[in-house]
Image (cartoon, rainbow, N blue to C red):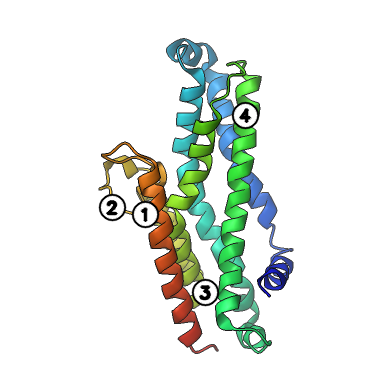
Amino acid sequence: MLLQLLAVERLKIRRKAVWPLIAAGGFGVVLLQAANYALRYDYLMKLNADDPWGHLLSETHFLAVPSLIIGMAIIASMIAGVEHATNAWKQTLALPLSRLSAYAAKFVLLIGLMFAACSMLAVGTIALGLCLSIGTDIPYDELLRICYLPLLAALPIGAIQLWLSVSLANQAIPLTVGVLGTVVSMFGMALGDFVPYKWPMLDNQWNEPLIPAALGLAVGLVIYIAGSVHFVRKDVK
């Protein structure tokens, strides 16, 4: 059932230019880094001669977090906006499927699309590093950490954005929340360890990136469940 609903959801957003946005989020960060190195190549190579891959991955992570958060807001709005734009919620929920399944399909689609963006980021970062001739000794463990752990840590943010986007017909509100959250995340290092908008930075007093990822997974599931329960009980116009 869920796979069928996912197929339907993909058809709904087929004309929404979702994949160009996903590619822009994943490869866009890489292009920004490429421009940075193109302008300051000699300086950056001398500054980080001892660990060029580490510097590249660190800078990529810093740019990728805001892109991830604003991407979640935009994609969640696009996924939910189809029914809002056409007043089709009643028709959608009149089908022989449960509301829980309908909500789950939207959430899984959101996370799946963001996973695709993270995968593009990983591939693009490897390609950029090789083009910059910083060596073939790629630290894959660090690469996977900066590309995928932030997605787990950002699950509460994605769950909130989907909840708002599904609940509110005016998509300006969830998008505004997304923009504000993106701005807050850029100052994540200054936030407390238990502020969700800091978690995708994977920085904490214990110096353990798995902690914010685990917190994100747990809190994200709680918020997702709360959103799905609200959706089941909500009157649909």
Disc 4 is placed on an element classified as: helix
Asked if the residue under mark 4 is in contact with the one under mark 3, i.e. CB atoms within 8 Å, the reply is: no
Helix, strand or loop at label 1? It is helix
Q: Amino acid at mark 3?
A: Val
Label 2 or label 3, whichever comes before in sequence order: 3
CA–CA distance in space, label 4 to label 1: 28 Å
Q: Residues within 10 Å of mark 4 (few under 14, many from 20)?
A: many
> Mark 4 — residue?
126
Which residue type carries mark 2?
Answer: Phe
Give the x, y percent position of residue 97.
65, 84
Q: What's the distance in space between the residues labelled 3 and 4, CA to CA?
A: 36 Å
Specify the quadrant of the image occupied by residue 33. top right
Question: Which residue is at a point 27% across and 42% down the rendered structure image?
Answer: 190
Disc 1 residue type? Leu
**Could you tell me how far apart the alpha carbons at marks 3 and 1 are, in whole angstroms?**
24 Å
* Pair 3/4: label in front: 4
Q: Which residue is found at the position 45% from the left and 12% from the top?
A: 50
Can you tell which of label 4 and label 1 is closer to the viewer?
1
- Cα–Cα gap, marks 2 and 3: 26 Å
Q: Which label's residue is closer to the chain start, 3 or 4?
A: 4
Look at mark 3 in the image and give the residue it sits on. Answer: 166
Question: Which mark sits nearer the N-terminus, 1 or 2?
Answer: 2
Q: Secondary structure at mark 3?
A: helix
